[in-house]
Image (cartoon, rainbow, N blue to C red):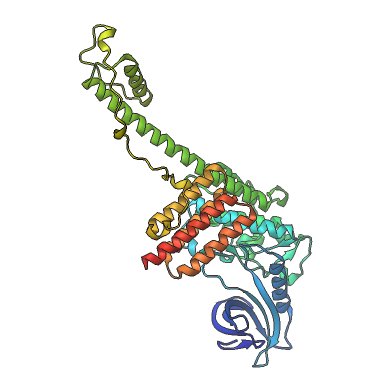
Amino acid sequence: MREGDVLTRRYRLVEQIASGGMSAIWRAFDQSLHRTVAIKVLDGSVGGDHGGRDLIRREARATARLIHPDAIEVYDYGETVTARGRLAAYVVMRLLDGRPLSERLTEGPLPWREAAVIGARVAVVLAAAHQRGIVHRDVTAENVLLTPEGAKLLDFGIAAFVGEHVDKRLADFGTPPYVAPERLSGASVHPAVDVYALGVLIFEMMTATLPYPETTWEAVESARRTGPPPAPRGVAGLPPEVTDLCRSCLAQDPGERPSAQYVADTLTASLSAARDAERWVRRARMTTVAVAALATWTAALLWIQPDLSAPVAAVVTAAASVSGTPPAPDPDPPATPQAARSPEPPDPPASAAPDRPDSVRSPAGWEPGPSAGSHATLTQAVGRFDAVLSAGETSGSIRADVALDLRQVVHNLVRSLNDPGQGLKDARRKLDDRAREGSLSPGVHEKLAQGLILIGIALQNAT
């Protein structure tokens, strides 16, 4: 195939963006619907082996059967004779901008939270596929695309159905380091092979290395693995339950591996627990600083004004003891209890009370007014969006992994600024998708939607 070729008088090939063993992926233009798409094309001779066509047709059918926001969308499938007399089978998909996870891993391991978010998203897609009887069979870092909307699982090219005994041709496809041991013995298709590959992926994201050194079919087939599976070591802050989860995914016995849904739930719970722990640490630090400041102030007050009443002295002494900072010694203690008393201070006049408008609200409960966005800077608008996410996490109105995902989407949008209009549309679509999944409450969804409007206004004002 060449640039400018048109498939079925509809899809004009614009640029080849990737190529594999038998097929190539093109950026193409749909002349009927006037949109840019991705097309995976298998170009072969008319009388040649049709095995490749069967595979690409299986991919189209499996992907179309799986409807999930984090799986690539299939629009069309077809076969046609090209202008040069060759037979082309093709599948038309949504074009996604991003880079493969494998490319990101060349820069080093991911922080465990980022790896957990990606792992949870992939696990959720796999769980949805398994519910529909589809097993991906090629979950790899190369087939996970990092987009502004989050991680997407691609390439169902060798997918099979649960319980199916695949033929030799389909069995030989895959990426050796991610292949589960039972695949080598010709076992029937089972979701556990995807969970094994997911365990390899999680291990790789957190360490930038593979759990086992074998990288070829010959090496994998001759490997004799004994003992418990390896676990990611030396990962800063990694919760023990995530370490155990990774090892259980890599179990040699498929019956000992968890389900993909369990993997997603465990990673999500770990992210939520870590965020809660950090929130409590921040609150404890703030409380310690506040109490210490109060103790220092009251100690100085006792030094300067030793004639405080006994109840006041007791209160400030207790505050100092809580903070661990003893009050300063009284250089001139009173001789009698009566000497420690001072006259009650007069009430301040009403005019001394500071003005406090009723409209003041905390950022977490902030709701924009008619002109709120016209004066908010981009930093303020993003800060308010983040505050709604944090408040929703605290109240349990939004899942922790979804909050982190939306936060990353908005921050990536602000950093890139390549196409803010499209970026805002993508962010709104993701927000709506998560709301339909039930991952956040209607109230939080409404506030976040308002926040995206303000970010859009701030972006316009900044340009």
Q: Tell me the quadrant of the picture where the C terminus can be found.
A: bottom left
Residue closest to the eye, 307 or 205 = 307
Is residue 234 among what the camera can see? no
Spot occupied by residue 264 in the image (x, y as percentages of width and height): 62, 51
Left or right, 54 with reference to 335: right
Identify the residue at the far bottom of this view. Answer: 84
Classify 29 as above or below 273.
Answer: below
Residue closest to the eye, 23 or 227 = 23
Query: Which of the 4 quarters of the picture holds residue 35?
Result: bottom right
Query: Which of the 4 quarters of the picture holds residue 286?
Result: top left
Left or right, 106 with reference to 313: right
Classify 12 as above or below 402.
Answer: below
Q: How many marks?
A: 0
Residue at 47% in and 41% down: 278
Is residue 92 among what the camera can see? yes
Left or right, 7 with reference to 150: right
Residue closest to the eye, 71 or 331 = 331
Spot occupied by residue 179 in the image (x, y as percentages of width and height): 65, 61
Spot occupied by residue 422 in the image (x, y as percentages of width and height): 50, 69
Classify 356 as above or below 22.
Answer: above
Residue closest to the eye, 13 or 445 = 445
Identify the residue at the far top of this view. Answer: 336
Spot occupied by residue 270 in the image (x, y as percentages of width and height): 56, 45
Identify the residue at the far front of this view. Answer: 350
Q: Tell me the quadrant of the picture where the N terminus can be found.
A: bottom right
Residue at 35% in and 25% down: 324
